[in-house]
Amino acid sequence: MNKLFLLLAIVSSLCCSAQDAKDNYSNTVKTLDSTLETLYEVISGEKGEARDWELFKYLFKPEAKLIPINRNKEGKDELHYRSPDDYIKTSGK
């Protein structure tokens, strides 16, 4: 359920920003499917493998929020609001 909620939050905030648009990224966001595929390609990979964070940022509006949910020790769900930059910072190298 947590992954589904995160996916829905991501999909609802996906966008290609016109002011930051790069011609070589435009094909990656032609459809919802290609946009999601691009997102998964950017965030997936082996630990320590370099990510294309510029492409990642291209997929979101500047004010976008990713909202992962964690269950705390008391069994209550906690929402965590993160910007794409926050996600990058917490992802490690």
Image: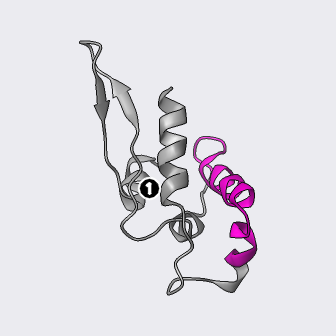
For this view, does 15 lie left or right of residue 69?
Answer: right
In the image, residue 19 sits, relative to residue 62, either above or below, namely below
Residue 52, placed above or below residue 72: below
Q: What residue is rendered at 39% in x and 61% in y?
A: 85
Residue 13 vertical placement versus 55 (above, below):
above
- As helix, strand or loop, the secondary structure at mark 1 comes to helix
Task: Residue 57: give x, y in percent of width and height.
Answer: 50, 67
Q: Report the span colored magenta.
A: 25-49
Identified at 64% across, 45% down, the residue is: 44
List x then y, in percent, for residue 81. 31, 47
Which residue shows up at 55% across the image and 71% down it? Answer: 58
Image x and y of residue 32, in percent: 69, 58
- Residue at image point 40% right, 71% down: 62
Residue 50, horizontal then vertical, whole percent: 60, 56
- The residue labelled by disc 1 is 88
The image's colour scheme reads: one colour
Looking at the image, residue 47 sits to the left or right of residue 25; the answer is left
Bin the neighbour count of mark 1 within 10 Å (Cα to Cα): few under 14, some 14-19, many 20 and up: some
Q: In this view, does 77 lie to the left or right of 61?
A: left
Left or right: where 52 falls relative to 60? right
